[in-house]
Image (cartoon, rainbow, N blue to C red):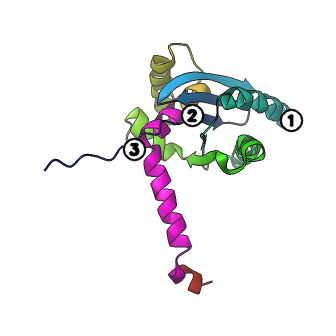
Amino acid sequence: MVRMEEDYRVLGKILAIDPSSKNMGWAIWDKGKYVDSGLIRYKSFLEAVEECKKVMFIAAYGGLNYLVVEDSYFHKNVASLKSITKYAVIPKVLVSEWFGNSVELAEVSPGSWQPKELSVASGTKRKERKRLSILKAEEISNKELSNDEADAINIGGYFVNHGNIIKKRKAKERVRKNSPKNKRGR
C-alpha cells in the first residue's frame, strides 16, 4: 500500500509581513498563488501605522485568513531589535482590532523559512541569504524588489507550502500547555 503524504499547503488568503526599523515588506497570497506585494517606508511609528492600515485594507478585500509575520530575532544591536519589535506589533494589533479571532496569526523565524524556501544551510552569510531571497522573489513576482519586499514574498510562500505543519505544531503546544500534568505544576 502506498502511503500518501499529508497536504501541508495552506490555500486561504495570506498577508505576509517582513518588518524592519525603516521599512515593512508585505505580500499577499491567495489560493496558493502570489497576488501582490510592496514596501511601506516610514519615518515615525504613526506613519507606519497609517501606511500599514492601507495595506491591511487592500489585503482584507474579499476576506483575509492569515497574517504571517517574521518573528524578530536577536541582532548584535539591541536598539535595532527593540525598534523592529515595535514595528512588528502594528499589523498584529490592526488584525486583532479589525478581525478579532477570524484571522489566524502566525509568526515564523528566519531560521525556519529561509532553509526551506531558499535552500540554504545554517551558517550561510546574511548577504547571501538576502541575495537568494531577492532572486527567488523576483522570479515569483516578475518585478525588481528590495530585500524586505522579497522576504515578505518568500515568507508568504513558506506559509503556503508549510503552514499546516506550523498550525499543527502550535496546536500540539497548546494541548501540552493545557494538559493536567502541566497544570499541577502551577
Amino acid type of disc 3? Tyr
Residue carrying label 1? 46
Q: Please, what secondary structure does the residue beneath circle 1 have?
A: helix
**CA gap, disc 2 to disc 3?**
15 Å
The verdict on residue 160 being magenta is yes
Residue carrying label 3? 8
Q: Please, what secondary structure does the residue beneath circle 3 have?
A: loop
Residue 22, image quadrant: top right
Residue 13 badge: 2
- In the image, the segment drawn in magenta is 154-181
In the image, residue 109 lies at what x, y percent? 54, 46
Amino acid type of disc 1? Leu
Residue drawn at x 43%, y 50% as measured from the top left:
165
Q: Please, what secondary structure does the residue beneath circle 2 have?
A: loop
Which of the two marks, 2 or 1, is nearer to us in this view?
A: 2
The verdict on residue 65 being magenta is no
Amino acid type of disc 2? Lys
Describe residue 70's horizontal placement relative to residue 3 as left or right. Answer: right
Tell me if mark 2 has few (under 14), some (14-19) or many (20+) residues whose alpha carbon lies within 10 angstroms of its own: many
Depicted 185 relative to depicted 126: above or below: below
Describe residue 163's horizontal placement relative to residue 107 as left or right. Answer: left
Badge 2 or badge 1: first in the primary sequence: 2
Is residue 75 something that shows in the picture? no
Q: Residue furthest top?
A: 143
Residue drawn at x 59%, y 28% as measured from the top left:
28
In the image, residue 34 lies at what x, y percent? 51, 24
In the image, residue 70 lies at what x, y percent? 59, 42
Q: In this rendered view, identify the residue nearer to me: 37 or 112.
A: 37
Badge 2 or badge 3: first in the primary sequence: 3
Badge 3 or badge 1: first in the primary sequence: 3
